Amino acid sequence: MNGAGPVIGFWALAALTLVAAGGVMVSRNLFHAVLFLIVSFVGIAGFFVLLSAEFLAMAQIVIYVGAISVLILFAVLLTPRAGRDNGETAVFPAAALLAVALAAVFLFVIYDADWATITSSPDVSVQAIGDALLDIWVVPFEIASVLLTAALVGAIMLVRTPEEEAEDALA
Amino acid sequence: MSALFLVTIGIENFLAVGALLFALGFAIALSKRNAIGVLMGVELMLNAVNLTLLTFSRFSPSDRPVAGATFVVFVITVAAAEAAVALALAVSVYRNRDTVDVDKINLLKS
Amino acid sequence: MPLPILATNNWYDFRDLSNFSRLILENLDKILPHGIVYVVAVLLGFVASFLIFVLPSQLIVGVYGERKLIGRIQSRYGPNRVGPFGLLQPIADAVKLMQKESLMPLRGDVIVMNIAPLIFVAPCVLLFAVIPFGPRMIIGNIPSALIYFIAVSGLPVLAAFMAGWGSDNKYSLFGAMRIVAMSISYEVPLVLALLGVVLFTGTLSLQGMVFWQRDLNIWIAFAQPLSFAIYFIAVGAELNRTPTDIAEAESEIVAGYLTEYSGMKWGLFYGMDIGYALAASAFAATVFLGGWSFFGLDKWVPPWLIIVTKTQLFYMIFIWTRGTLPRLRVDQLMAFAWKFMLPIAIANLFVLATERMMWVRAFDADLKFVWVFVPINLLFTAGVVFAWARFLGYRPENTPRKARLVNQAGGFIPLGGAKGETRP
């Protein structure tokens, strides 16, 4: 993949995504951390476009930026007295060391291995994904729908207040 | 790795971004005090995995190139379900204990 | 493929403005280095669509026309002082907003509060990239334009949330939470309604949908009336138009997430609210009302004129509902989304999928037979809306058909109703 457009796009997106992810780490305000997380999600969506998977990029925007980050924002709002600080626990040095070691191992493997690559982009159109989802992967597709329903019911049951439970017991 | 690595991007560059993102998410998930912060780290790790999957789907020779994209769809689905339940748990814990600090949720500690 | 309209390829042919832009770009390509022309093309498209369509519509129809029409609906004149017929009122408003002092709450989150209007503006510009203004007049003819539209129109919610949070004001936060909750609730029936359209047309591209409607000489609004109605209500709720504008309800929470904003920052929110309403209208005109085609008339009239007219007329319905209907309560709106719209949208999708399957099996997917489904879907729409409304407790026979005075109704009825008049 070369040419000015993809290369500039790649480095810009890499900088955006990683700096935003670092912002989640260093930001002391939990709300700012969520905003950095959203920027990082958008950067990942840009990577998906670069990898010629436009449908997944849009799904990423709809689900991560539109739904999951809003859920996280709501959770931040609903836990007001818990403090908005985004500090670290005492295990931070150990965790950072572990993460650095992990990254080092990953990067060594990535740049050491001799990857077999193709130059032309394969066909991952919406139609191909749809056909695959309803053809070979129809069973995981159905299981995913059951999982989503279970998560929906479970989330509603978890956040009910005692008063609501008492009302439901009366009804 | 040649001197051209700035003007030609290949599979290594995408994988490196995915690995760095995963490591950052890993560090965040391990070290944050707030339960919601931990969840944000987990989401970052899932995103890194998605990026890696799509990179392999794009660059690797395969007789079924849609597999990577389909797997990403499933990962996104599971991530959405996981986020909903985890945040419901956080709110529920907050209602009972008035905190979402993972250091202070230690009722089982003797 | 030969062009299906009579427009020629000459640059002065105003029936297809893409000729002119192509002339500019081809000449630029000879001067500029390789590749730059692609960047220029996108910029040119955005600037042209904004100058030709969005900005005049925002100023003339969105600000002046809306206030004038609302004024007539409410038995007053509306703006009539500045310029002839008050036509310069939008400019006077803008000048007033620009010279206002920009006030900032002392304890607010200044960075978040300043970024929020910018994030609110950017997606509105991006939305117009996929709207086709003619057979060749489209900035980005991407294959999954529908999902692009849904994805991008979800972004301003975040900006509103940031505005509400950064203001450090309890009314702002209430407004932000309301707008987020409501847009999430109404997104579900909206997407289900659009899924029905995709089932029939078999494409996610907006240009493909216009061609489908043009080839069959039918609008999807006729073939799927229930999808159209659901889209109209849900998008009105997502845009915070007045019957559903609980996020900035003046009588409850001062101005919602806009409470602490002043000057041009408020102006950006206000102007882009109209911009989003215009984008939603253009989208509705494209998906449901035939886009730039008009039963063969698009051969003679410029197609971009047709879709601009359709968009403005659709926007008029927004103004009409805004002037006519009273504002609903927040719990009513939530209940309406989850108890009324969602079951009806799912039933609609089920029926449409069945029809699509029958269509493929029985008629060999012959496109002419889509007319068979028009009366079926009309009857289904009327029936299911009536039945589900009755099931949820609304009794139409108890609603007075004629206007009557309070005395005739037995004086002021608090709540719960009087003599035999049961309210749900």
Image (cartoon, coloured by chain):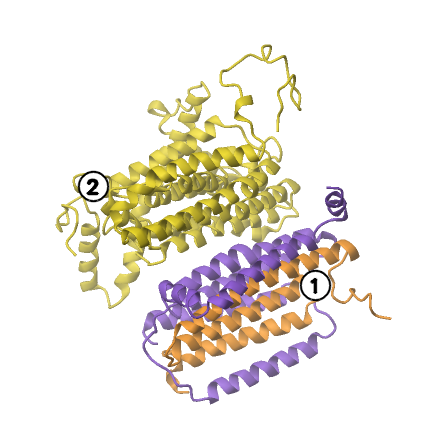
Chain colours: A purple, B orange, C yellow
Q: Nearer the viewer, residue A71 or C94?
A: A71
| Chain at tag 1 | B
Name the amino acid type tagged 1: Asn
Name the residue at 34% across, 36% down. C312
Location of residue C309 with respect to C19 vertically, above or below:
above
Location of residue C164 with respect to A116 vertically, above or below:
above
Residue occupied by mark 2? C298
- Please rate how many residues cluster around mark 2, counting C-alpha atoms within 10 Å: few if below 14, some from 14 to 19, many from 20: many
- Give the percent coordinates (x, y) of residue C244: 52, 36
Give the structural element (helix, strand or loop) at label 2.
Answer: helix
Give the structural element (helix, strand or loop) at label 1.
Answer: loop
Q: Nearer the viewer, residue A117 or C268?
A: A117
Q: Residue furthest right?
A: B110
Location of residue A62 with respect to A139 vertically, above or below:
above
- Give the percent coordinates (x, y) of residue B60: 40, 80
- Give the percent coordinates (x, y) of residue A139: 49, 67
Name the residue at 36% across, 36% down. C314
Q: Nearer the viewer, residue C352 or C24?
A: C352
Residue occupied by mark 1? B34
